[in-house]
Image: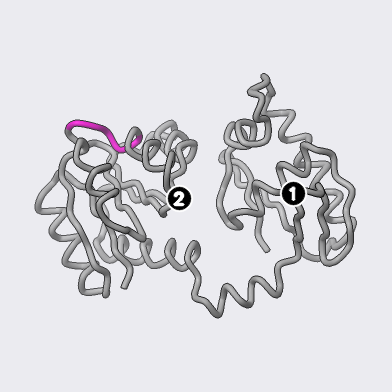
Amino acid sequence: MAKVLIVEDEIKLAKLLKDYLSQAGYETVLCHDGLDVIDVFKRDTFDMVLLDLMLPGKDGLTLCKEIRSFSQVPIIMVTARVEEIDRLMGLELGADDYICKPFSPREVVARVKTVLRRITPSNQQQDDQSRQHPIELDHNKHQVKIYGVELSLTATEFNLLEILAKEPGRIYSRSQLIDLAYRDHRIVSERTIDSHIKKLRKKLNDINSEHELIHSVYSLGYKLEV
């Protein structure tokens, strides 16, 4: 049974979410104060965090960043602030999805199911994906094979492909890719990332043009789908 940490300072709303998720078969824990979240999170093992943006003590974006510093648990941000900057900031810090208030509790349950299914597939699905995964990466040898064919990549292209391939389906913003691909913190423009991705995508398509592996996500960044 998956366990969900519900971080919401509106008591009635938190209990409503708890009731709906419990009926859907999830175990839930409630937390109402931003200052308590990290301690509660570290005391237990959670499969998902429903994280409200506006909280007393410490806001949701700060908490998302702190959790991401030591855990890759799926995080769904819950917010009444729908400005684009908040959406982008949340993705920068590693949120997996957004739900905007007002919402239907049934929608929350559906979103939780979708994110957990995407990020934590069943053992059978994992076995199938392992057998069908077209990308073989050897970090130590700096070698990559696509559909069994060895591919020649530059160091930056290899780093980008390795980052994207670690979490298929996850959207990485350009600034995230810059931080992860350039460990020396050099100043790199987002257009440079676009250029490297374009070249990498062409090399991948030269081997198999029927299945696009790297996808652009409008206004957000890039993801890899296998």
**Residue pushed farthest top?**
187
Instruction: Inspect the magenta stretch and tell me whether residue 8 lies in it.
Output: no
Q: CA distance from mark 1 to mark 2?
A: 21 Å
Residue 33 image offset from top left, x and y in percent:
16, 40
Colour basis: one colour
Instruction: Inspect the magenta stretch and tell me whether residue 60 lies in it.
Output: yes
Q: In the rendered structure, which segment of residues is drawn in magenta?
A: 57-61
- The amino acid at mark 1 is His
Query: Which residue corresponds to the image point at 73% horizontal and 57% vertical from the top-left?
Result: 213
Magenta stretch, main secondary structure, is: loop
Crowding at dot 1, Cα within 10 Å, few <14 / some 14-19 / many 20+, comes out as few
- The residue tagged with tag 2: helix, strand or loop? loop
Earlier in the chain: of badge 1 and badge 2, it is 2
In the foreground, 186 or 198? 186
Of tags 1 and 2, which is closer to the observer? 1
Residue 82 image offset from top left, x and y in percent:
36, 38
| Label drawn at residue 72 | 2
Residue marked by disc 1? 139
* 75 w.r.t. 17: above or below: above
- The amino acid at mark 2 is Gln
The N terminus lies in which quarter of the figure? bottom left
Query: Which residue corresponds to the image point at 84% horizontal and 39% vertical from the top-left?
Result: 154
**Residue pushed farthest left?**
12
